[in-house]
């Protein structure tokens, strides 16, 4: 049952507790925000907010990483906040790296965004990456970060599976 309360969606879920076989009601609450030009956030009107979803992948030329993880889980001990976006260089002046962050209610996520790099081999035959290419905008995506099929932390990333030139 999906009910709207104010400017957020709510799903009450009944779950059989693993200890004591007691039924428990859990309310899953979802609210979506827009970031305004001045950096503040504003809750979207309820009609403009997406309803609860399952896992949603990207489907574009970069790959198939996850845009949004599923909203429902049997156990989430804390609140999640998911940031999807693009890093923009200040004043559109190209940069090789850029630190970005997002903070809400004392919880902060920070990233260092690098320009595109390639793996090569140095004079000793060891793999190394090139300096970052300057950029004015860079998608914040798993496909743009280090990883590869053998990397448990990021199977969508670049680097580990590349042939080293």
Image (spheres, grey):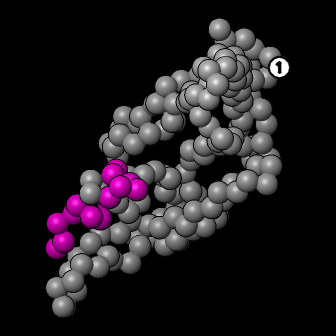
Magenta-drawn stretch contains 96: no
Task: Please state which of residues 36 and 83 is positioned toward the viewer in this rendering.
Answer: 83
Name which residue lies at 71% across and 37% down: 34
Q: Which residue is mark 1?
A: 6
Identify the magenta region.
151-165
Name which residue lies at 21% across and 63% down: 162
- Residue 111, image quadrant: bottom right
Q: Quadrant of the C terminus?
A: bottom left
Among all residues in the image, which is located at the extreme top? 1
Task: Please state which of residues 33 and 146 is positioned toward the viewer in this rendering.
Answer: 146
Residue 60 lies, in percent from the top left, at: 35, 38
**Could you tell whether 30 is left or right of 158 in the image?**
right
Secondary structure mainly formed by the magenta segment: loop
Q: Quadrant of the N terminus?
A: top right
Q: How many marks?
A: 1
Packing grade of label 1 (10 A; few <14, some 14-19, many >=20) is few
Magenta-drawn stretch contains 163: yes
Which secondary structure lies at badge 1? loop
Task: Please state which of residues 122 and 72 is positioned toward the viewer in this rendering.
Answer: 72
Among all residues in the image, which is located at the extreme front? 20
Residue 54 lies, in percent from the top left, at: 49, 25
Q: Is residue 39 visible?
A: no
């Amino acid at each position: 049952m999906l009910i709207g309360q104010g400017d957020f969606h709510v799903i009450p879920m009944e779950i059989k507790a693993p200890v004591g076989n007691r039924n428990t009601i859990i309310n899953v609450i979802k609210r979506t925000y827009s970031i305004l030009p001045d950096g503040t956030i504003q809750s979207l009107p309820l009609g403009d907010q997406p309803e609860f979803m399952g896992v949603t992948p990207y489907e574009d030329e970069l790959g198939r990483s996850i845009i949004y993880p599923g909203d429902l889980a049997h156990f989430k001990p804390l609140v999640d906040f998911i940031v999807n976006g693009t890093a923009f260089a200040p004043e559109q002046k190209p940069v090789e790296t850029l630190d970005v962050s997002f903070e809400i209610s004392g919880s902060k996520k920070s990233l260092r965004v690098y320009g595109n790099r390639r793996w090569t081999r140095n004079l000793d035959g060891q793999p190394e990456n090139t300096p970052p290419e300057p950029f004015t905008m860079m998608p914040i995506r798993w496909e743009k970060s280090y990883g590869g099929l053998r990397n448990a932390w990021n199977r969508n990333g670049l680097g580990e599976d590349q042939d080293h030139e």
